Amino acid sequence: MASSSNQPNTTLYVNNLNDKVNKDELKTQLYALFTTYGKVIDIVASKNTKMRGQAFLVFSDLAGATTAMRACEGVMFYDKPLHIDYAKSKSYATLQIEDPNFVPPNAANASSLVSQNGKRPRDGDIPDSERQSKRERADESDEEMEIDDEEEAPQKTEPSAPTIVPSQVQKPTAKLLCTNLPQEVTDDVLGVLFQQYKGFQRTHVTWSPALNPAGIRVKMGQVFFESSELAITAKDALDGFTLKKGWQMSVVYI
């Protein structure tokens, strides 16, 4: 990656994103891709004209942000290579961690990123302040995917009809079963989680035939790898992964 012209920052500025992707799906998949390198505490993305094709990802520490920037620069994401740099200024989430007494400015007269040198950031580095302020209230102690209902109705891809749950086996195989998936999860979302592991081939998400213990309709997904040896690493890494608050994914061999 080319050296950054900005000072190291826990907030990353990502652009060259595919602006045809639904906002909720975009944020979910950005989380899935970047959270493997550090704890992501906030994601700001918008479909308005100023922010189209751009996003801000806030990490809990600089090490995670730097590792993610180096690892994901140029990665193909929805058929476009990611362009990543440190943001020019700190996010509200970061400032509130550094100073518990920090109070975000009124969204009507301030940007959602506060410039480190007191100057107004350029338009390309300013996320939607109203949505940023709303997201600061999320509990930063838990790693989760935030699904934001603002701006546009989610265009979710409906999975196929419910099927019988495949039988679990103890011996490693090339096929994994993921259960307790929220309704927002699609083939693409699950694929982003698993594609970082060598040998990944494809995913197949369907409705689970039974409700979960809370009476909520959930999904399940099959993940296919080239071999059982390659599936082991992915299974061990993602079994118990927190998709969003209160939703831990279970991964078993089938």
Image (tube, grey):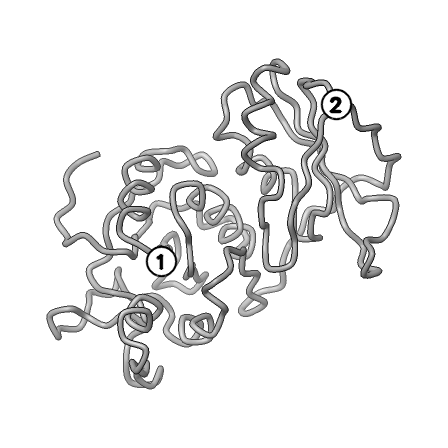
Q: Secondary structure at mark 1?
A: strand
Where residue 73 appears, as percent x and y from the top left, is 30, 37
Quadrant including the N terminus: top left
Give percent across and percent down for residue 229. 59, 15
Q: Is the residue under label 2 in contact with that under label 1 (CB below 8 Å)?
A: no
Q: Nearer the viewer, residue 46 or 223?
A: 223
Q: Quadrant of the C terminus?
A: top right
Check the image and report above or below for 18 versus 115: above
Please, is residue 66 above or below residue 109 in the view?
above
Relative side of 106 to 147, left or right: left
Residue visible at 28% across and 45% down? 84
Residue 57: image x %, image y %? 37, 55
Q: Residue at x 29, y 42 (%)?
A: 69
Could you say which disc has been placed on residue 58 in the image?
1
Q: Quadrant of residue 70?
A: top left
Relative to residue 125, is residue 110 depicted above or below?
below
Could you tell which of marks 1 and 2 lies nearer the N-terminus?
A: 1
On the question of residue 56 being in view, the answer is no
Q: Amino acid at mark 1?
A: Val
Image-based side of 19 in relation to 86, left or right: right
Label 1 CA crowd tier, 10 Å (few <14, some 14–19, many 20+): many
Name the residue tied to disc 2. 170
What's the CA distance linking mark 1 and mark 2? 38 Å
Height in image: 178 above or below 14?
Answer: above
Residue 205, disc: none
The residue located at (87%, 44%) in the rendering is 209
- Which element type, helix, strand or loop, lies under badge 2? loop
Q: Quarter-wise, where is residue 122 in the image? A: bottom left
Q: Nearer the viewer, residue 168 or 244?
A: 168
